[in-house]
Image (tube, rainbow, N blue to C red):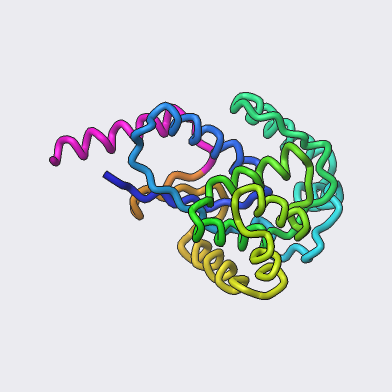
Amino acid sequence: MSIKLDILSDPICPWCYIGKSSLDRALDLRPGHPFQIEWHPFQLNPDMPLGGMERHAYLERKFGGRESARQVYDRIAEAAKTAGLKLDLDGIKRTPNTIDAHRLIHWAGLEGCQNAAVTCLFKAYFEECRDIGDRSELLEIAEAVGLGRTVTERLLGTDADIEQMRARDAHARNRGVAGVPTFVVADRHVVQGAQPGDLWLRVMDELCEQSEASS
C-alpha cells in the first residue's frame, strides 16, 4: 500500500521544521509506513527582496515590534526543544528569499533525494545559521545530498522553474492554504500545523487497518 503525503512548507518556517521532526520520528517507529512523501513550495514572504533582509528588522516588521517577536519565538524555542531540536534562533542574521531553495527542493525530488535536501536546508538555516538564499550555500547543500554541483550551479544561474514554483505556491493559496506546514493525505485529508508524532502514528495505524480490512 502506498499513500501520497503532500507537504507544503517553507525552509525558513520554524513550525515546518518542528512538524517535520515529529513526522520523521513517527515514520522511524513505523518502518513499513505507507506514505509516499512529496514536498511542495510555499513562500512565507513571496515579496521578500532577492537578497533577503536583516533578521531583526524583518521580525520587528512582521510581528509588530521586538517584544512581540520575542514572545513568538520564545514559544517556537520551547516547541523545538520538546521536538528534540537545537535551534540557534539568535544566530540567524538574515531572512532570505527562498525561491532558489524551493527550486533546489524541486530538483532534488526529480533525483530522489528530496527529503534529504529539505532536512539539510532546515538544519543549515535554523542550526548552522547559514544564508540559504545565498547560491554558494545552496550549492554546498546540493552537493551534500547528491545533486551534481556543476549542473545545479548552471540551473541556479538561469530562471529554470522559477515560474513553476510561483505557480504552485499560488495554486496552494487559491485552494485555501494560508500557512504552513500543511499536510495533505491521499489528496483528501488536510492536516494543518506542526503535529505531534502520536497523531501521525494513529493516522498510519488507521490507514493500515483500513487497508487490511478491505483486502
Q: Residue at x 48, y 53 (%)?
A: 112
User: x, y (%) of residue 140?
Assistant: 72, 52
Dominant SS type (magenta): helix
Q: Residue at x 52, y 66 (%)?
A: 168
Q: Residue at x 55, y 38 (%)?
A: 19
Judge by depth and name the residue closer to the eye, 12 or 175.
12
**Quadrant hosting residue 33:** top left
On the picture, is 205 further left or further right than 67?
left
Q: Quadrant of the C terminus?
A: top left
- Highlighted magenta segment, given as a residue range: 193-215
Judge by depth and name the residue closer to the eye, 109 or 204.
109
Q: Residue at x 65, y 55 (%)?
A: 44
Judge by depth and name the residue closer to the eye, 193 or 153.
153
Q: Quadrant of the N terminus?
A: top left
Q: Is residue 16 above or below residue 204?
A: below
**Quadrant hosting residue 81:** top right
User: x, y (%) of residue 173?
Assistant: 53, 63
